[in-house]
Image (cartoon, rainbow, N blue to C red):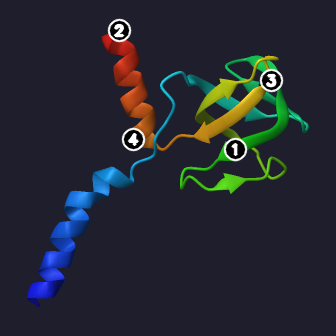
Amino acid sequence: MRYLITLILLLAVAAPSWARDLPADGIPAEFRALEYPFVNLAGRQFRLAPGARIFNTMNHVVLPYPMSGDAKVLYTLDIRGDVQNIWFLTREESKVLENKKKSR
């Protein structure tokens, strides 16, 4: 029993370190999927860059084909202005970004 309590305490302390590292230069936006290879971010149409990576809320890379619906995301652009990376945000991450935006 003591080992179980120790394990739970270690996991509780280590849990914040499992959070994702989102880029500081990421741009928050509302996401809407369009016909591949295009996406709508904050009301503007963008093209996905070759090799673009899309991360779901569990930080797994997903394919762009099954994307649908609206969601809050963070994205980065490559040098040509194409979308290089997209991170789908959890509710908590979205709230943190909104609070940072309000504090500026």
Query: Which residue was labeled with disc 1?
Result: 54
Please identify, in this view, whether the residue under mark 3 or under mark 4 is nearer the observer. Answer: 3
Q: Which mark is residue 92?
A: 4
Which residue type does callout 4 highlight? Answer: Glu
Mark nearer the N terminus (2 vs 3): 3
Mark nearer the N terminus (3 vs 4): 3
What residue is rendered at 68% in x and 35% in y? 85
Q: Where is residue 53 drawn, in percent x and y?
A: 72, 43
Q: Where is residue 52 drawn, in percent x and y?
A: 77, 39
The quarter of the rendered structure image containing the C terminus is: top left
Please identify, in this view, whether the residue under mark 2 or under mark 3 is nearer the observer. Answer: 3
Which residue type does callout 1 highlight? Answer: Ile
Please identify, in this view, whether the residue under mark 4 or under mark 2 is nearer the observer. Answer: 2
Query: Which residue was labeled with disc 2?
Result: 104
Label 4, label 2: how far apart the Cα atoms are:
19 Å
Mark nearer the N terminus (4 vs 2): 4
Mark nearer the N terminus (3 vs 1): 1
Q: For the residue carrying disc 4, how many other residues have a C-alpha within 10 Å: few (<14), some (14-19), or many (20+)?
A: few
Secondary structure state at the residue bearing disc 4: helix
Question: In the displayed structure, does residue 73 sit left or right of residue 78?
Answer: left
Query: Which residue was labeled with disc 3?
Result: 82
**Residue farthest to the left?**
2
Question: In the displayed structure, does residue 31 sit left or right of residue 102?
Answer: right
Mark nearer the N terminus (2 vs 1): 1
Which residue type does callout 2 highlight? Answer: Arg
Label 2, label 1: how far apart the Cα atoms are:
28 Å
Say which of 10 and 96 sits in front.
10
Mark nearer the N terminus (4 vs 1): 1
Q: Where is residue 93 drawn, in percent x and y?
A: 43, 38
Q: Where is residue 41 drawn, in percent x and y?
A: 71, 24
Secondary structure state at the residue bearing disc 1: strand
Relative to 27, residue 36 above or below: below
